[in-house]
Image (cartoon, rainbow, N blue to C red):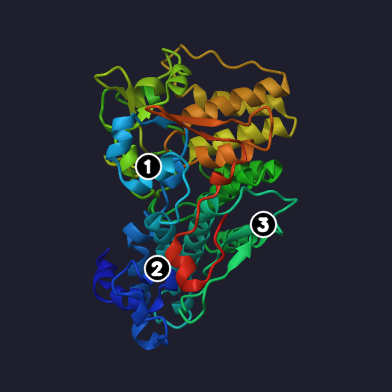
């Protein structure tokens, strides 16, 4: 970790010169100073392999810049009118699905991670030092980070993926260079997902079969991310294949009977289920004192289901708050990384959708037996495909709250009438609704990006 000093000494030059136009205004200096500047890469880029390691070791940028707006907008919790009014304006707009283009952090922060990944990729051929393995791992990690952040942005600022319309639907601004002389342009949605998938597939051969540390990418992390992405695209067979590939390399599940039900933080960071550690931006709406667990969701957990007491804690007023974060730290930053429980659920869902109900139910049972009190779990026995799918989707929601996954699930499931859902918020005398496939499932791009770079705005 000694190379972290590079972040403090040299990275400011990279930030000032290399960040995309639409990030500069919110960073170290005003945007106008750089709009017409020609980058001088001799002072902005690192010169040794240790410099690149220093950039990659910057956890706060490389692992912790994922947007949390999707969690704020999801339906696993609710705010009282008083708590709603006391939170930040952007959080109120996310929560009530209102139209606003001033969402600076959730839009710009992921691009900071992307920019640093681009600096690594463009600098690597020029720097000295490092053996082939270490250089490959740097390249593979940078590709993984760039792809993961681009995908996270697409979940907010582009429509849900639809193979029939993806060639015409607007995607996001793909940043594949550190050169600020190249203005970003919005790709179409097909190009967005193709770029993300290409980066990930390219990274596979460069990365180890197990991570050196869990905040670095590995083959199972890439396979897991591809499984997540193909699930969101509703390409279920491919998603299942990648989930299987990830689990073939790493399949450990936690035994919840060995966890404390009374601990304020039941899970440590880098716990045994985590394949890749990452987190979203802090969100004031998600504080334990504000975010109350949806009562219907909480009612789904049986008394012997340990998740009921490990994931949640009782509030004095009879409501419940979430405490079961895989980040291992207190705060409002949701876990956004890859973990084995998510992969078992992808395996289960995709197997059932492919017609192999037994395999899907077996995968679900393998996960759930680790979540219940010893000797109390009764395995699901389901032979009907529709019933099995509904059961797995319900268990997926119970297993993965506050991981920013619910928003993508809502978006993809809205294409299926039997699972489509109208979301409702009640705040005092005002009711807000979000219909399936509603326009507010796509957030407006930050207006600074539109003004500076001329990107087309979402409707």
Q: Residue at position x 69%, y 48% from top?
A: 162
* Residue 199 visible at all: yes
* x and y, in percent, of residue 31 in the image: 36, 75
Structural distance between the alpha carbons of marks 3 and 2: 24 Å
* Residue 384 located left or right of residue 101: right
17 to 255, vertically: above or below: below
Name the residue tied to disc 1. Answer: 92
Name the residue tied to disc 2. Answer: 23
N-terminal of the pair, mark 3 or mark 2, is 2
Question: Which residue is at the front of the view, 392 or 415?
Answer: 415
Q: Are marks 3 and 2 in contact (CB under 8 Å)?
A: no
Name the residue tied to disc 3. Answer: 169
* x and y, in percent, of residue 274 in the image: 42, 42
* x and y, in percent, of residue 345 in the image: 56, 33
N-terminal of the pair, mark 1 or mark 3, is 1
N-terminal of the pair, mark 2 or mark 1, is 2
65 to 315, vertically: above or below: below
């Amino acid at each position: 970790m000694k190379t972290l000093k590079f972040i403090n000494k040299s990275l400011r030059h990279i930030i000032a010169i290399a960040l995309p136009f639409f990030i500069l205004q919110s960073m170290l200096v005003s945007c106008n100073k750089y709009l017409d500047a020609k980058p001088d890469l001799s002072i902005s880029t690192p010169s040794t392999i240790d410099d690149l390691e220093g950039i990659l070791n910057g956890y706060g940028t490389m692992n912790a810049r994922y947007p949390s707006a999707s969690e704020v907008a999801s339906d696993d919790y609710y705010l009282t009118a008083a708590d709603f009014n006391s939170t930040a304006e952007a959080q109120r707009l996310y929560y009530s699905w209102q139209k606003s283009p001033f969402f600076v952090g959730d839009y710009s922060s992921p691009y900071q991670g992307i920019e640093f990944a681009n600096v690594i990729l463009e600098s690597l051929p020029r720097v000295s030092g490092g053996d082939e393995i270490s250089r490959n791992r740097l390249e593979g990690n940078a590709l993984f980070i760039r792809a993961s952040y681009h995908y996270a942005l697409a979940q907010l600022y582009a429509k849900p993926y639809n193979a029939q319309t993806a060639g015409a639907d607007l995607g996001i601004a793909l940043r594949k260079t550190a050169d600020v002389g190249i203005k970003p342009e919005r790709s179409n949605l097909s190009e967005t997902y193709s770029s993300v998938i290409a980066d990930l597939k390219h990274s596979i051969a460069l990365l180890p079969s197990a991570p050196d540390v869990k905040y670095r990418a590995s083959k199972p992390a890439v396979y897991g991310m591809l499984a997540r992405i193909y699930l969101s695209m509703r390409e279920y067979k491919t998603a299942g294949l990648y989930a299987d590939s990830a689990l073939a390399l790493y399949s450990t599940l936690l035994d919840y009977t060995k966890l404390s039900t009374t601990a304020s933080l039941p899970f440590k960071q880098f716990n045994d289920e985590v394949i890749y550690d990452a987190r979203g931006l802090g969100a004031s709406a998600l504080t334990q004192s504000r975010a109350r667990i949806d009562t219907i969701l909480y009612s789904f957990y049986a008394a012997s289901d340990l998740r009921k007491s490990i994931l949640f804690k009782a509030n004095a007023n009879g409501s419940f708050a979430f405490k079961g974060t895989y980040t291992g730290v207190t705060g409002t930053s949701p876990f956004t990384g890859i973990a084995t429980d998510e992969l078992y659920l992808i395996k289960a869902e995709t197997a059932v959708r492919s017609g192999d109900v037994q395999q899907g139910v077996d995968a679900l049972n393998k996960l759930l037996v680790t979540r219940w009190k010893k000797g109390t779990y009764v395995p699901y026995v389901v032979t009907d495909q529709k019933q099995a799918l509904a059961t797995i989707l319900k268990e997926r929601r119970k297993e993965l709250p506050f991981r920013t996954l619910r928003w993508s699930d809502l978006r993809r499931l809205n294409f299926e009438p039997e699972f489509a859902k109208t979301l409702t918020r009640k705040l005092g005398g005002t009711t807000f609704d979000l219909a399936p496939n509603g326009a507010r499932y796509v957030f407006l791009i930050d207006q600074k990006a539109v003004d500076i770079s001329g990107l087309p705005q979402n409707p």
